[in-house]
Image: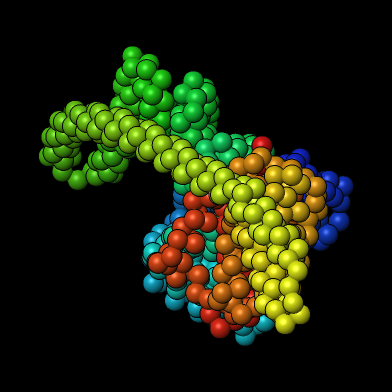
């Protein structure tokens, strides 16, 4: 069942990062110890297949190592060039990547084994998607998919299905994308191509996020994390953690969001790719800025230093802007202004470098031209003067534009922060109001229950006692017996009403025992079999958690009795990772879960209100005209 799978993935993700690359370490050692050329080539090819966990330098180093093994081995050469395509794609050199594909496709097609030819053909569609040529990318992927089906290469089939889904996702067509990604996942699962599952699940997570289905987005994000860890796909793992951080920020869970992006940074550092480390450190500084501006400054400074050390000019500009923002947030306006000026100068330096290259090209052409030298020299001097004038003008305009954007960004950022704070205050006030309403309701229930139990119940008992002492003739005894029977029924109804308002067993013995008593009462009166199980049956929680979860289950069971037509209900309580997991499952008729959003009654609204008070989440697995409904509730424990 989907809920159990999600819990299982969450448990496995607690494994430490140190154990994530044993396969790569083992392959490195084997490559070093192996001297036989053919076997060494196979080992290096296997090592390169884990390119998503390798830094750019490591990837290029092993591509060169494979190429140097045997110049006459076409398969080694083609394998090396396949992963060079990935390298050039990473370092933003798509033209170099396409040249390698064009050069090697005829050679790969001539080989008996078409594996490398299909891989190169797939990579052509991959590059088209990266360059935003989506329609051409889809056509190329479908062409390669058909060829892969002909040659029965399931690996490339999965890659192409994923490639089509990726293109549709970038075209903002998540529904169409999900159709292709589902096919990719099903095929990969069927033939156990576990190494291709992480990216597929991550793309599905993005699709569900684009559709606003955050529960499904989080579910597939967890699956992507699990399979990325299982297959040593560190790059996908870091990407999944970054996406999970965004999901957690949407749920206003900043602490968990920070933990996720911190884990992503840890993985990036493990891979050793400065480009992504700087990017994630910049995002981490943004996350810290909500709770600790000083810590955000330290993190943004680390990103700036690494970008400067690694000569990542574009990343340096983004890190500098983040450093200026967190300094503003911390009230250090002087430092922020200085950093913004440095960023303007940095942008200006990039601009001057680009113009210097243009000037160099002009001068090179000039040196090649010999005919009419005097006239051309005069023309070139005029061109250079024009360029210099334009340079000066562009520099001034560029600096002004950057400064305007910086000021506008600061004002926008400050306004956004104020809106966030007002929203947080409003949310806190609303939560306090809901807590007071629920508390007042429960207190009133408790008072009425006590009044019924202590006031009306003794009166009924006294009436029954007095009536039973009346000596009547035999012919009148049926009426007296009927009166006594009605008093018994009234007493039982009164006792049941008092229990529903506030069961004393809930305050005395806790949630599990109260649910068991509810099951016993309903099981006898409604002909409904209810099972209650708990891994810690005597565990006690705060009164807030116990009362609200009891009311939630009470509402769910009442709905099952009224609408589902079920004969069996299972209530299960488990504990894991400081969380209480509550599952209510029935064998009745399912329903359209989306109808809950427009429900007229107060039942669903009351459930959501109580979950808000205990910081819980709920997920419903049901479909119309399908037997069985499962409701899964997760509540964090202190």
Q: Residue furthest bottom?
A: 150
- 506 vs 397: above or below: below
Q: Residue furthest top?
A: 334
For image coordinates 23% across by 43% down, the residue present is 370
Quadrant for residue 273, please give it. Answer: top right
User: Which residue is located at x 30 percent, y 26 percent?
Assistant: 344
Q: Is residue 265 left or right of residue 124?
A: right
Residue 343 visible in the picture: yes
The residue lying toward the viewer, choosing from 328 and 491, is: 491
Q: Is residue 330 left or right of residue 452?
A: left
Residue 30 location in percent, x, y?
Answer: 84, 50
In this rendering, the answer to whether 480 lies above or below 24 is below
- Compared to residue 422, the image places residue 477 above or below, namely below
Residue 115 x, y percent position in the rendering: 66, 73
Q: Is residue 21 visible?
A: no
Q: Residue at x 67, y 59 (%)?
A: 463
Percent across and percent down for residue 400 are 20, 29
């Amino acid at each position: 069942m989907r809920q159990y799978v999600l819990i299982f993935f969450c448990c496995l993700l607690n494994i430490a990062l140190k154990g994530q690359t044993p396969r790569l370490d083992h392959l490195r050692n084997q490559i070093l110890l192996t001297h036989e050329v053919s076997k060494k080539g196979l080992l290096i090819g296997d090592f390169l297949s884990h390119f998503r966990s390798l830094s750019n330098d490591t990837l290029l180093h092993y591509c060169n190592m494979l190429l140097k093994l045997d110049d006459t081995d076409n398969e080694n050469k083609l394998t090396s060039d396949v992963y060079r395509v990935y390298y050039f794609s990473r370092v933003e050199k798509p033209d170099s990547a396409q040249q390698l594909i064009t050069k090697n496709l005829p050679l790969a097609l001539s080989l008996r084994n078409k594996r490398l030819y299909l891989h190169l053909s797939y990579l052509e569609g991959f590059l088209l998607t990266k360059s935003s040529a989506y329609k051409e990318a889809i056509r190329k992927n479908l062409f390669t998919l058909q060829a892969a089906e002909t040659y029965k290469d399931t690996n490339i089939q999965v890659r192409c299905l994923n490639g089509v889904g990726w293109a549709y996702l970038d075209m903002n067509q998540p529904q169409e994308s999900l159709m292709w990604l589902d096919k990719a996942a099903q095929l990969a699962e069927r033939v156990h191509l576990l190494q291709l599952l992480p990216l597929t699940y991550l793309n599905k997570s993005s699709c569900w996020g684009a559709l606003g289905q955050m529960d499904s987005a989080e579910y597939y994000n967890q699956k992507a994390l699990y399979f990325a860890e299982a297959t040593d796909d560190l790059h996908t793992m870091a990407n999944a953690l970054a996406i999970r951080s965004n999901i957690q920020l949407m749920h206003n869970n900043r602490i968990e969001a920070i933990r996720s992006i911190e884990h992503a940074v840890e993985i990036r550092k493990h891979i050793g790719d400065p480009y992504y480390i700087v990017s994630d450190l910049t995002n981490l500084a943004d996350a810290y800025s909500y709770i600790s501006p000083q810590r955000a400054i330290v993190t943004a400074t680390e990103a700036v230093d690494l970008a400067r050390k690694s000569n990542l000019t574009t990343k340096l500009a983004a890190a500098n802007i983040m450093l200026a923002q967190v300094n503003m947030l911390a009230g250090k306006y002087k430092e922020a202004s200085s950093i913004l000026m440095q960023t303007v100068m940095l942008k200006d330096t990039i601009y001057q470098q680009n113009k210097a290259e243009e000037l160099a090209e002009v001068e090179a052409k000039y040196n090649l031209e010999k005919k009419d030298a005097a006239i051309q020299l005069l023309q070139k001097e005029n061109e250079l003067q024009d360029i210099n004038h334009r340079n000066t003008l562009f520099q001034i305009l560029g600096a002004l534009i950057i400064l305007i954007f910086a000021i506008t960004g600061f004002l926008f950022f400050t306004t956004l922060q104020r809106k966030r704070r007002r929203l947080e205050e409003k949310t806190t006030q609303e939560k306090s109001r809901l807590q007071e309403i629920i508390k007042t309701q429960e207190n009133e229930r408790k008072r009425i229950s006590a009044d019924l139990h202590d006031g009306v119940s003794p009166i009924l008992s006294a009436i029954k006692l007095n009536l039973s002492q009346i000596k009547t003739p035999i012919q009148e005894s049926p009426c007296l017996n009927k009166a006594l029977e009605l008093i018994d029924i009234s007493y039982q109804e009164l006792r049941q009403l008092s229990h529903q308002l506030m069961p004393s067993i809930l305050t005395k013995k806790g949630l599990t025992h109260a649910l068991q008593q509810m099951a016993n009462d309903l099981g006898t009166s409604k002909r409904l079999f209810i099972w209650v199980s708990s891994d810690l049956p005597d565990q006690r929680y705060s009164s807030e958690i116990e009362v609200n979860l009891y009311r939630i289950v009470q509402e769910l069971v009442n709905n099952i009795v009224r609408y589902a037509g079920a004969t069996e209900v299972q209530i299960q309580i488990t504990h894991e990772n400081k969380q209480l997991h509550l599952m209510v499952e029935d064998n009745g008729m399912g329903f359209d879960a989306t109808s809950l959003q427009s429900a007229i009654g107060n039942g669903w609204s009351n459930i959501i209100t109580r979950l808000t008070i205990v910081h819980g989440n709920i997920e419903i697995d049901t479909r119309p005209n399908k037997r069985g409904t499962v409701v899964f509730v997760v509540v964090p424990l202190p």
